[in-house]
Amino acid sequence: MIKAAVVVFPGSNCDTDCLHVLKDVLKVQAQFVWHKEGSLPEVDLVVLPGGFSYGDYLRTGAIARFSPVMEAVRQHAAKGRLVFGICNGFQVLLEAGLLPGAMLRNQSLNFVCKQVWLKTDTVDTPFTRNLKKDEILSIPVAHGEGNYYCDDETLKALQDGGQIAFRYSSATGEFGDEFNPNGSRDHIAGIMNEKKNILGMMPHPERASEGILEGTDGLKIWNSLLGTVKN
Amino acid sequence: MFKATINVTLKKSVLDPQGKTVLHALETMGFSEAKDLRVGKYFELTIDAADNKSAQEKVKIMCDRLLINPVIEDYTFNLTETK
């Protein structure tokens, strides 16, 4: 059986949603791990959930990255196992240097909470293997600091290395400022590390994983990574 | 004891929508003299160190490791000895 851990930081607030989807929808053996833990149980997948760890003080994710569990997450990732950071989890991964770049305040300065369209960029990765190139997903975002920034050199490396997983687009796949909810560079919604076993994304697939909610496109991502673990 | 005053600014290459909005508010208030504005951060840190040199080193490490994010921010600091 696939095993997963959901890390809980003080201020995480999507931890229960992630655990629910993993356990009750995907039938994965999942458990919470408190951020003070210096080690992780033997798991295939670690989820860093959304929320406002440490009240977003200093910078989003800046303090959580020093939680003891983050060293264990680093080691887990170094073994090639999967790490999935969603929203604040993505911000923590950036601050920890496990993914390149940084987050800035949304260009509008507003907290943005709405359904957005994502265009799948790189397929054949542990997180996107069930998706087709350019496939459009509808998944909600909810953040005040999701304006992804990196320098030109890093952006080129992300593009050339196929590290961009998802970009904000229209329902029909066009790019434009009107479809970019936060001003992210190159419309980036989610990126992976070079080895592609770490994904960080601002949209919340755990909020789009049951029919009773707004669509189930999030399941395509969850099922991709579960398929990766199974093989 | 030393007191460090640390100024943090967004790198020139990074857009500052907050600064732009505040500048726009100044313009709306009639301050046509206001031409450019960028919002930064300021820290006051009291630090126990043997001498100025080691205080400098410590502040630099603290800035680089936690207080600033080198991807988007630059910083400068001043150090004064206090009683």
Image (cartoon, rainbow, N blue to C red):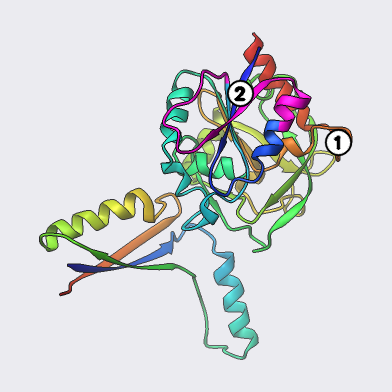
- Earlier along the polypeptide chain: callout 1 or callout 2? 2
Vertical placement of residue B58 versus A7, above or below: below
Q: What amino acid type is highlighted by mark number 2?
A: Ala
Vertical placement of residue A53 versus A78, above or below: below
Name the residue located 53 percent from the left edge and 40 percent from the top edge: A155
Vertical placement of residue A32 versus B60, above or below: above
Name the residue located 53 percent from the left edge and 43 percent from the top edge: A9
Q: Position of residue A194 (x, y in %)?
A: 50, 26
On what subunit does the disc labeled 2 rest?
A
Image quarter of the N terminus of chain A:
top right
Toward the right, the furthest residue is A212
Residue beneath disc 2 = A4
Q: Position of residue A59 (x, y in %)?
A: 49, 55
Q: What amino acid type is highlighted by mark number 1?
A: Gly
On what subunit does the disc labeled 1 rest?
A
Give A42 or A90, whichever is nearer the viewer: A42
Query: Could you tell me how many numbered marks the image carries?
Result: 2
Give A39 or A136, whichever is nearer the viewer: A39
Residue beneath disc 1 = A215
Q: Is residue A73 magenta?
A: no
Give A90 or A184, whichever is nearer the viewer: A90
- Which contiguous range is marked in magenta? A20-44
Name the residue located 86 percent from the left edge and 36 percent from the top edge: A215
